[in-house]
């Protein structure tokens, strides 16, 4: 077995589930153990380690005093009953690639223009704490550190104390200016596998709209309360859930949708549900496709509220527009893949990644390796060892290009995006009540 | 203010909620406090107190050595954010009526043939622990004591330890043979109020069908997982929830329905729900009306499972048929109401009550007083003080008739029903998977 596979199997034991997955949600004891394991690996590789205030963990090769750093990494946290590969593969591939570059540097085979750091971003998954891509969002300045530290899980524990609880609360930002970012990840879909392609070169991300909704009905008795008098928030939720699916299924483009985290109160068998909260997602390749979907969603909420005699409020709405990754990075990765004899295909990422956040401030390259059967966010997630090793080689050479060639040097050092327009919670809630929208979606 | 109203306001302070209701779920500290309060009231009234193994609390006037006992009562437990009147009114009205009868006996104005006991039945609501009407079901022998003690709340606490936790675990059954039962309760609907009627005489109960269902889908990513590959248990749940409502709305008779306690797993925002459990109820005046509804429900589950590519299983099904209360009791109550100058109306109870259980073993009388606006199982539940006082008078005189006249004496002492047919969990689960029912509903 390769050293890399053996290292991967090592970390997969942390939070392992009986069915072959991992449950290593952000800032749990299992996440803490994985961070401890990674810190040891960083030190064994001769790296300096650093933890910033939101717990992002870095292993750094300080090669060029005063020079910026090229970052590479992903995340060690997982979904509940999640897969071994999602995130962890990218962190380990980054470490392995960094070690190979360090070996090349020691033998004089590499003359870097930049420093190199491997990152384990805090809470990419957003399962225990929302929002997702939390650590990288704080890093790029799109989420304030204070807001992130205040986020609470369903037991009321906040990020600040959870970080302290596992000893992962740093005190200072990374002391190196970022120059670029490269992330490798399992595809989580089946496009590469179905086409028999070795590696994916990510050219951009799908657009998303995410909404938290609250439905206010009225608590009553499931027995004697006359049906005409009911204001059943769970019935309203059902109309919304199936209606959202209908919007996606009826779209003219490939559109993905989901409604999750459906929570009803007071949650007693013979009490009509007075309040439901839920999370709604709509995704499509182009933001323009989501505009009519959002119109339809608004109409759906009004219809569902009217029919169930409830009030429906969008309590939080966020959008991520379709954006391009660094085109020069895609070109470099394509050439490297060709050099290494890997078949490669350009595609867009449908899932969110830390790279989407980094892409807002530095030239960013995102690479995929195939997933088996497209399984993702479950214990059956799989990627062939050969594909993982291909990915490590691709990543190492791409990183080598970036830290030695002129491509990054020619880039403006920071191209920070206006944070108003990108995947940021907007104060744009709207309400629907018995056919009378009480707010506006216009600002979305 | 009347003594009765003042006593009622007293108990309403135990577990009071800011909005004017109570949260006094079964076997919580609040329920324990209410039981302690009631025990003191029993003692102050000169009653012997007794607690049986499931925690049913009795206050007893041992008037006639060796004679059976006429029971009267209701329950002090509430729904979460429930009303002050539901249950508590009946317990206090029973206590007040019993005290009046004791006063009459002391002055020689009453010569009882029976003993009299006021009962606070354990866990009528079934909010924290299922099933509902737990204490009275154990009392009448339709639920085994062991099964009841094993029931767990969502934190994994079982009834046995919850009983001990509040010091409400007795060691022996009540030592008196029951001869009859009378319960008074707020209507929880608006039939009396709309008709301007003082009291309701309950002639029978609506039939119900209750189902616990489990939907098994498959965990995946809400983003990249292709829609054709999804097995979204929450989408299936939505189809079931709205479909159940359609069944009730489309029925030829007045049919009430609800779907509650909808719980999704793993409950992460960007993970397609792999499993949902939910509780479904269908109610109608006549059991025969529920047969076609159950057929439609079965077809709905198959349709929802097929459309969502999930498997839906009925994990528990129970039925309560429409049953008559003691006709002679209705006649007696009608005469008493007339004597007292109260307008009275016969009606059926749509909600479940402890009296439905008692009705299976002894002649049982069920009385209603009007609810304001039909509000029930919420903090806005209300009944006018004058209506409460009317009810106490009606109850006292009906009880007086039963313990002095020959009606009960002429009854067979016990008419225990075959427990197979009555409101008992049946092993009759059925599954629906992609159009192929994998079980049978025939035994329902």
Image (tube, coloured by chain):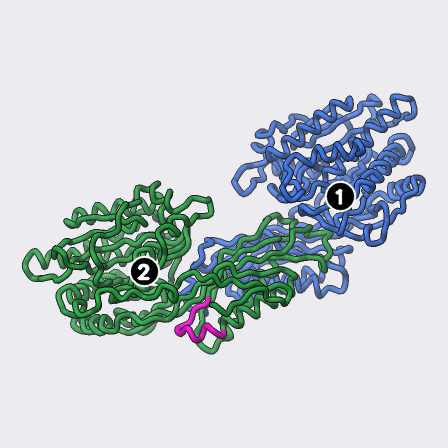
Chain colours: A green, B blue
Label 1, secondary structure: give it. Answer: helix
Judge by depth and name the residue closer to the eye, B37 or A393.
Answer: B37
Name the quarter where the N terminus of chain A is drawn.
Answer: bottom left
Chain letter, disc 2 residue:
A
Q: What residue is rendered at 53% in x and 66% in y?
A: B434
On the image, the x and y values in percent for residue B85 come to 73, 41
Span of residues in magenta: A282-292
Label 2, secondary structure: give it. Answer: helix
On the image, the x and y values in percent for residue B408 come to 87, 35
Image quarter of residue A236: bottom right
Q: What residue is rendered at 37% in x and 56% in y?
A: A125
Residue B203 higher or lower than B10, as above or below: below
Q: Nearer the viewer, mark 1 or mark 2?
A: 2
Residue at the farthest right position = B339
Q: Is residue B363 visible?
A: no
Judge left or right: residue A278 versus residue A78.
right
Instruction: Identify residue for label 1.
Output: B356
| Mark 1: few/some/many CA within 10 Å (<14, 14-19, 20+) | many
Query: Does the magenta run of residues contain A284?
Result: yes
On the image, the x and y values in percent for residue A208 come to 42, 67
Query: Does the magenta run of residues contain B402?
Result: no
Q: Are marks 1 and 2 on the same chain?
A: no
| Mark 2: few/some/many CA within 10 Å (<14, 14-19, 20+) | many
Residue B94 higher or lower than A393, as above or below: above
Residue A354, label in figure: 2
Q: What residue is rendered at 79% in x and 34% in y?
A: B1
**Distance between the alpha carbons at the discs numbered 1 and 2:** 60 Å
Q: Is residue B14 visible?
A: yes
Judge left or right: residue B434 versus residue A97.
right
């Amino acid at each position: 077995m390769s050293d890399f596979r053996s290292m991967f199997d090592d970390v997969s034991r942390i939070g392992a589930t009986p069915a072959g997955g991992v449950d290593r949600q952000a800032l749990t004891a299992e996440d803490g153990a994985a961070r401890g394991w990674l810190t040891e690996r960083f030190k064994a590789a001769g790296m300096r380690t650093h933890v910033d205030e939101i717990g992002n963990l870095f292993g750094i090769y300080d090669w060029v005093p005063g020079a910026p750093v090229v970052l590479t990494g992903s995340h060690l946290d997982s979904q509940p009953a999640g897969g071994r590969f999602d995130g962890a593969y990218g962190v380990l591939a980054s470490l392995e690639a960094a070690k190979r570059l360090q070996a090349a540097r020691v033998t004089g085979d590499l003359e870097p223009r930049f420093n190199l750091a491997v990152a384990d971003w805090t809470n990419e998954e957003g399962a225990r704490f929302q929002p997702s891509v939390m650590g990288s969002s704080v890093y790029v300045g799109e989420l304030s550190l204070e807001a992130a530290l205040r986020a609470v899980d369903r037991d009321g524990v906040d990020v600040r104390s959870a970080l302290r609880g596992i000893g992962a609360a740093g005190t200072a930002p990374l002391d190196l200016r970022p120059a670029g970012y490269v992330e490798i990840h399992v595809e989580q879909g089946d496009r590469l596998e179905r086409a028999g392609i070795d590696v994916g070169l990510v050219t951009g991300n799908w657009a998303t709209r995410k909404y938290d909704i609250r439905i206010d009905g009225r608590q009553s008795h499931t027995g004697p309360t006359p049906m005409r008098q009911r204001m059943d928030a769970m019935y309203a939720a059902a109309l919304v859930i199936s209606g959202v699916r209908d919007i996606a299924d009826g779209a003219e483009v490939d559109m993905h949708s989901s409604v999750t985290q459906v929570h009803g109160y007071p949650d007693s068998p013979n009490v009509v549900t007075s309040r439901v909260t839920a999370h709604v997602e709509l995704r499509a390749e182009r933001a323009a496709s989501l505009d009519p979907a959002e119109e339809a969603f608004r109409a759906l909420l009004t219809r569902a509220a009217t029919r169930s005699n409830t009030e429906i409020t969008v309590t939080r709405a966020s959008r991520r527009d379709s954006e391009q990754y660094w085109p020069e990075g895609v070109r470099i990765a394509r050439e490297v893949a060709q050099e290494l004899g890997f078949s490669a295909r350009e595609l867009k990422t449908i899932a969110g990644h830390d790279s989407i956040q980094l892409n807002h401030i530095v030239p960013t390259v995102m690479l995929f390796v195939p997933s088996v059967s497209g399984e993702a966010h479950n214990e059956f997630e799989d990627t062939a060892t050969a594909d993982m090793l291909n990915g490590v080689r691709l990543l190492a050479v791409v990183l080598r290009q970036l830290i030695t060639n002129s491509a990054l040097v020619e880039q403006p050092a920071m191209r920070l995006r206006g944070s108003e327009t990108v995947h940021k919670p907007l104060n744009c809630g709207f309400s629907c009540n018995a056919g009378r929208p009480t707010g506006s979606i216009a600002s979305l």
